[in-house]
């Protein structure tokens, strides 16, 4: 299952990177309108392709897994189907995130994606007391001057 996820993540990342290269060329030539048009096309194409992959996964998850894994126990197949469908639902979001992150790098504003990641981390950290405890114990474990 992870091989499929890695492959699709690499495809979506390559698409985002390629689109960002085109946008960067327009930015470098000071052609703002063309850069905006290329960025819009990148987001649109990424959304269409990743949504198509998601629909494929949702509609054909059982035959795809049967082809890839053959006959396995029913419990294993049920778990694989659940994992595959949930992963499939994430592909459009992952694709759009990758495209936006690549575009921000093209505009020399990579700090935006870093701030978003930081905010997500702090949201989960403050929302889940268990997460806070885990983070605290990990930070103490790896703090300078603590030997274990």
Image (cartoon, grey):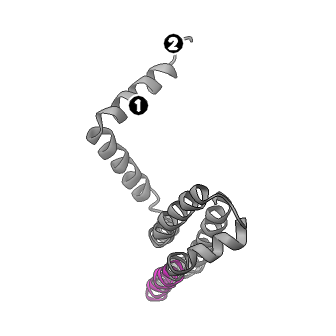
Residue at 36 percent of width and 27 percent of height: 133
Residue at 44 percent of width and 69 percent of height: 93
For residue 21, side relative to residue 86 (left or right): right
Residue at 41 percent of width and 31 percent of height: 135
**Residue wearing tag 2:** 146
> In which quadrant of the rendered view does residue 29 lie?
bottom right
> In which quadrant of the rendered view does residue 23 lie?
bottom right
State which tag comes first along the sequence, 2 or 1. 1
Q: Residues within 10 Å of mark 2 (few under 14, many from 20)?
A: few
- The quarter of the picture where the C terminus appears is top right
For residue 17, side relative to residue 138 (left or right): right
Per the rendering, the mark at residue 27 is: none
For residue 105, side relative to residue 69 (left or right): left
**Residue wearing tag 1:** 135
Q: Position of residue 43 (x, y in %)?
A: 46, 80
Describe the element under mark 2 as helix, strand or loop.
Answer: loop
- The quarter of the picture where the N terminus appears is bottom right
Describe the element under mark 1 as helix, strand or loop.
Answer: helix
Stretch in magenta: 33-51
For marks 2 and 1, give the one nearer the viewer.
1
Q: Position of residue 2 (x, y in %)?
A: 64, 58
Q: Position of residue 87 (x, y in %)?
A: 51, 64
Residue at 30 percent of width and 46 percent of height: 123
Q: Residues within 10 Å of mark 1 (few under 14, many from 20)?
A: few
In the foreground, 28 or 21: 21
Residue that lies at the very extreme toward the left in this rendered image? 127
- Vertical arrangement, residue 84 with respect to residue 61, above or below: above
In the foreground, 136 or 53: 53
Q: Is residue 127 visible?
A: yes
Q: Is residue 30 visible?
A: no
């Amino acid at each position: 299952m992870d091989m499929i996820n890695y492959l699709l993540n690499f495809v979506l990342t390559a698409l985002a990177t390629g689109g960002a290269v085109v946008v960067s060329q327009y930015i470098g030539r000071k052609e703002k309108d063309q850069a905006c048009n290329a960025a819009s096309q990148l987001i649109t194409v990424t959304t269409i392709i990743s949504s198509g992959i998601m629909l494929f996964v949702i509609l054909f998850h059982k035959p795809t897994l049967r082809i890839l894994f053959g006959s396995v126990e029913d419990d294993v197949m049920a778990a694989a189907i659940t994992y595959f469908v949930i992963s499939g639902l994430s592909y459009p979001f992952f694709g759009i995130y990758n495209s936006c992150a690549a575009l921000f790098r093209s505009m020399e504003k990579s700090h935006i994606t870093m701030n978003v990641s930081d905010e997500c981390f702090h949201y989960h950290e403050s929302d889940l007391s268990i997460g806070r405890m885990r983070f605290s114990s990990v930070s103490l474990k790896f703090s300078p001057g603590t030997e274990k």
